Every structure is written in C-alpha cells, then in structure tokens.
C-alpha cells in the first residue's frame, strides 16, 4: 500500500487541523494524543511522509530517535509518571489506525492500568495544559 497524504496527521502537519503541539522542528512534530491511553500520552510524528516503519527512510528514523528520547524524559518529569511506554504500530493487522508513521510515548503510573487504544477523547483544556507543561520540561 502507498502513502495517502489525506490522513489526519498529514492534515495536521500542513496546518489544516489544529493540534496541541508540544515541540516542532524540521524533522518532527510532537503533540498530545486526543484519545490518550494515560495522562500525558504524546505522539511523535516525523514530517517526511511514510506510511509506517516498513517504508520509512532510515535517516528519518535516525533523526527522530533523539527527539523521542528528549520528549520521553520531559514527559516523565512533567507528569510524574513512573515509566514511559514507547509504542508503534505497522498496518491495520498490527493496530495502526492512522497511516502516517508515528510513535506513541505513553506515561505509565504504578497501579494505574492503561486505557484502551483510541478509547475516550481527552478534555481539550487538560491537553493544552499538559502540552505546555511538557514543552516547559524540554
């Protein structure tokens, strides 16, 4: 299958749809997941179009990994999480629902189970506040 630029992340990257941005540079956009599995669930989205890990440019992957590490550290500080889960899905059979390469950074809290993937929509004001707090911790 090929990349379809009409996906929601493509639209967000083009500024057609708003997002709670945490960080942005020439390589990636970091934003809050509006259907979080836990408080602070963040997405790292490479700007170069690719469907997923299977067709991504290795140089893009190399450039995105340090961003993910910095964001994970800031996310842990800003939320007080006990750990951070990194998740990434490739094709529908593996759970991918948006076909633009992206990585989930999901805070884990001792004794608190994760919500279902794409379960319920988060409060918009809370997402904005979390985005600012994580950005400040970068």
Image (tube, rainbow, N blue to C red):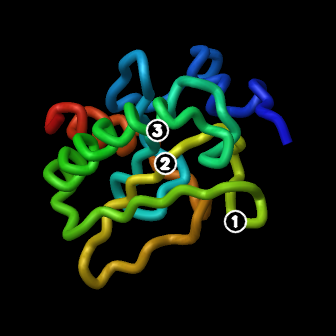
Which residue is disc 3 drawn over?
61
Q: Quadrant of residue 66?
A: top left
Tally of numbered discs: 3
Mark 1: few/some/many CA within 10 Å (<14, 14-19, 20+): few
121 above or below 63? below
Kindly state the secondary structure of the residue where label 1 is placed: helix
C-alpha gap between disc 3 and disc 2: 11 Å
Q: Quadrant of the N terminus?
A: top right
Q: Give me the residue at 69% from left, 65% from top.
A: 94
Residue 17, image x, y percentages: 62, 23
Residue 52, image x, y percentages: 64, 44
- Of residue 19 and residue 95, the one placed in the foreground of this image is 95
Direction right: furthest residue? 1
Q: Give me the residue at 29% from left, 42% from top.
A: 130
Q: Earlier in the sequence, mark 1 or mark 3?
A: 3
Residue 4, image x, y percentages: 79, 30
Which residue is disc 1 drawn over?
94
- Asked if residue 117 lies left or right of residue 55, the reply is left
Q: Quadrant of residue 120?
A: bottom right
């Amino acid at each position: 299958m090929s990349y379809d630029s009409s996906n929601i992340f493509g639209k967000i990257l083009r500024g057609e749809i708003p997002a709670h941005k945490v960080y942005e540079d020439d390589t990636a956009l970091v934003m809050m997941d509006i259907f979080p599995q836990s408080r602070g669930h963040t997405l790292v989205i490479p700007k170069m179009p690719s469907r997923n890990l299977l067709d991504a440019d290795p140089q893009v992957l190399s450039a995105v990994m340090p961003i993910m590490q910095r964001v994970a550290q800031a996310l842990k500080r800003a939320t007080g999480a006990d750990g951070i889960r990194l998740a990434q899905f490739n094709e529908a059979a593996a759970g991918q629902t948006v076909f633009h390469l992206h990585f989930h950074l999901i805070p884990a809290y001792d004794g608190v189970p994760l919500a279902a993937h794409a379960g319920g929509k988060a409060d918009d004001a809370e997402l904005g506040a979390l985005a600012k707090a994580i950005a400040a911790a970068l």
